[in-house]
Image: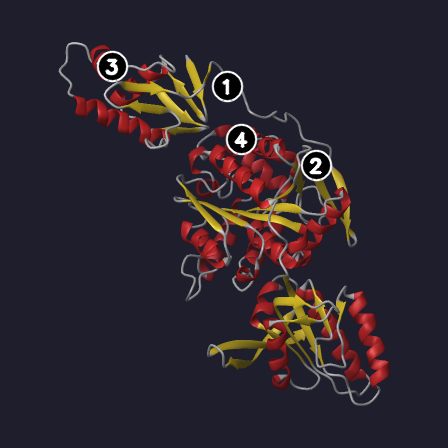
């Protein structure tokens, strides 16, 4: 017989306690105490009755019973000062106070089949998406690494996870370009963070979503963070599940793998794609389950080719959004499991420590995938967090790439016209060339580089002298549309160090365009007198 209460199920015949899909360890005597109280819901039972019926003919003192009650509370996560399950009445006894259910009754409707697949246009490509639910807020769920929309729903735990999200939102799911049901692309054109943002934005526009909470899992987290910083007006809140800021190890980021370890993993992908690659680190509690292993292997095969999986892994290894995190001004929740075998819990702590006002929730467990193990606690926290995030005021600062461009002395007016055309073509926000202000700002660093490189190349062909510098950072826009702030001041200081006929960018810009095909070489270091930190600069070699 099974008895259900809150997130727990108690199997009285097998003497096992479960929280969601994860078994909870409970010593035999403590289990006896819990089963006894559950059999008398809302009944105040005195200590003498409990000891007589639980341990007849055995001498047991009050301390032993108190100890077992404490063990039960630990297993249930119950606070004796604010109990949800077991109430203590001093000198009178104990009462089990939670509502019991004879059978599991989901608090939401489980979606049994994959929803209809739709497509949004992102540039020249088609991005597949699903929309589920009709709740008061929009959630965009960003899966990591590779994905396949229809295979989301073929795994019961995953389907349950998504169904619960859809119970309190309009849930939006999509496959990034090159994966799943979206258009496949050549291996050298797999999506950068910037293009992934474009795909997300295209899907939101297609479904008429003006503002959404972004929930990013694992590798989906950095892009979600970048989106939140770049488009705060479109972001209700940010949730990062088992995610990271940088993939490779660094002097001040000791938790990631080394480049050699990442190369070895790429070799492993080449040799083993088609099977359940990486399952031991991502879902250790289900790694031996035949059905889950078969689903995971099929899901990966359907999500990406071996070459695409390896290329995405190498591209993701270059991700570093650490400078972006302090710029995020929307409500943020970071959730990480203590024993995550894929991404260390220190990486989650780092994320939360760098995002202003972020809440960090560390949960027990070793599974990396949020829908494996105790998913209910994660889902409860997301629902609670987003219910309060909807009332947060919109931030005044955004992440943008500022472009400074020197106007040539000769042919100035003709060149200005070309500048305006190129800024429009690359979807920039035109500035004012006459005030020593940025020529333009962009919501994507790769587009900003390509715009600058194109203008400098055109000027060189015309025999004109110009140069350009770019940095991505926090910008504040005035009423007249002009950008100011630290990012703008930094680019202004970069200009004197930029040679004629060249485009120079900061390290931040270089890191954010990983996988774009843009080539760089080291230039000089810019010393910032405010904090004495050297900022490496890089010259753009080709686009």
Secondary structure beneath label 3 = helix
Which numbered disc, 2 or 4, marks the residue closer to the eye? 2
In the displayed orientation, state which residue is furthest to the left. Answer: 59
Q: Mark 3 or 1 closer to N-term?
A: 3
**Distance CA(mark 1)–CA(mark 2):** 27 Å
Q: Which residue is mark 3?
A: 50
- First in sequence: mark 3 vs mark 2: 3
How crowded pointer 1 is (Cα within 10 Å; few <14, some 14-19, many 20+) is rated as some
Where on the picture, by quarter, is residue 251? bottom left
- Disc 3 from disc 1: Cα separation: 28 Å
Q: Which residue is mark 4?
A: 157
State yes or no: discs 3 and 2 in contact (Cβ < 8 Å): no
- State if disc 4 and disc 2 touch (CB < 8 Å): no
Q: Secondary structure at mark 4?
A: helix
In the figure, is residue 96 to the left or right of 315? left
Image mark for residue 131: 2
Which residue lies at the image location 78% right of the left edge and 82% below the top edge? 459
Residue 219, above or below 528: above
Question: Is residue 186 in view?
Answer: no
Work out whether mark 3 precedes mark 4 in sequence or the reverse, and give the earlier one.
Answer: 3
- The answer to which of 44 and 448 lies nearer the viewer is 44
- Residue located beneath label 1 in the image: 104
Residue 218, compared with residue 6, is above or below; it is: below
Task: Give x and y (percent) for residue 276.
Answer: 52, 39
Spatial CA distance of label 2 from label 4 is 19 Å
Quadrant of the rendering where the C terminus is positioned: bottom right
For marks 4 and 1, give the CA distance: 15 Å
* Cα gap from disc 3 to disc 4, whole angstroms: 38 Å
């Amino acid at each position: 017989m099974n008895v259900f209460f809150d997130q727990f199920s108690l199997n009285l015949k097998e003497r096992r306690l479960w929280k969601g899909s994860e078994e909870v360890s409970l010593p035999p005597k403590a289990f006896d105490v819990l089963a006894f109280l559950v059999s008398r819901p809302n009944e105040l039972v005195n200590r003498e009755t409990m000891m007589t019926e639980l341990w007849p003919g055995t001498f047991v003192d009050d301390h032993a019973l108190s100890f077992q009650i404490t063990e039960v509370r630990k297993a249930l996560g119950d606070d004796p000062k604010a109990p949800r399950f077991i109430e203590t009445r001093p000198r009178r006894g104990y009462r089990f106070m939670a509502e019991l259910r004879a059978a599991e009754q989901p608090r939401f409707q489980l979606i049994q089949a994959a929803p209809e697949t739709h497509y949004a246009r992102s540039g020249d490509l088609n991005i597949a998406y699903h929309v589920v639910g009709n709740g008061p807020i929009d959630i965009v769920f960003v899966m990591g690494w590779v994905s396949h929309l229809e295979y989301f729903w073929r795994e019961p735990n995953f389907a349950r996870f998504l169904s619960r999200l859809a119970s309190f939102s309009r849930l939006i799911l999509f496959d990034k370009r090159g994966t799943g049901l979206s258009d496949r692309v050549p291996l050298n054109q797999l999506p950068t963070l910037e293009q992934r943002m474009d795909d997300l934005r295209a899907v939101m526009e297609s479904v008429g979503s003006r503002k959404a909470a972004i929930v990013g899992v694992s590798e989906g987290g950095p892009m979600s963070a970048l989106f939140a910083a770049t488009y705060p007006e479109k972001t209700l809140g940010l949730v990062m599940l088992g995610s990271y800021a940088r993939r490779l190890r660094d002097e001040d980021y000791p938790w990631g793998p080394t480049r050699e370890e990442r190369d070895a993993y790429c070799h492993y992908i080449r040799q083993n794609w088609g099977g359940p690659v990486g399952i031991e680190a991502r879902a250790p509690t289900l790694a031996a389950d035949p059905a889950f292993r078969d689903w995971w292997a099929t899901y990966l095969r359907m999500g990406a080719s071996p070459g695409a999986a390896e290329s995405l892994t190498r591209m993701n290894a270059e991700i570093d959004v650490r400078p972006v995190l302090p710029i995020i001004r929307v409500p943020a929740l970071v959730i990480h499991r203590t024993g995550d075998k894929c991404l260390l819990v220190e990486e989650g702590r780092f994320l939360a420590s760098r995002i202003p006002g972020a809440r960090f929730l560390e949960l027990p467990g070793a599974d990396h995938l949020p829908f494996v193990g105790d998913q209910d606690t994660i889902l409860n926290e997301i629902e609670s967090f987003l219910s309060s995030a909807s009332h947060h005021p919109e931030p005044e600062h955004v992440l943008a790439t500022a472009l400074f461009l020197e106007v040539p002395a000769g042919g100035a007016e003709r060149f200005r016209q070309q500048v305006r055309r190129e800024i429009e073509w690359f979807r920039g926000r035109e500035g004012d060339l006459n005030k020593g202000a940025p020529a333009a700002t962009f919501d994507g660093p790769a587009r900003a580089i390509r715009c600058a490189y194109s203008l400098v190349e055109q000027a060189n062909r015309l025999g004109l002298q110009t140069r350009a510098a770019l940095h991505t950072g926090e910008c504040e826009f005035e009423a007249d549309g002009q950008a100011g702030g630290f990012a703008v001041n930094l680019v202004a200081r970069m200009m004197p160090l930029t040679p004629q006929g060249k485009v120079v960018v900061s390290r931040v810009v270089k890191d954010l365009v990983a996988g774009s095909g843009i080539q760089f070489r080291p230039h000089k270091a810019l010393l910032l007198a405010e904090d004495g930190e050297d900022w490496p600069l890089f010259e753009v070699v080709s686009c």
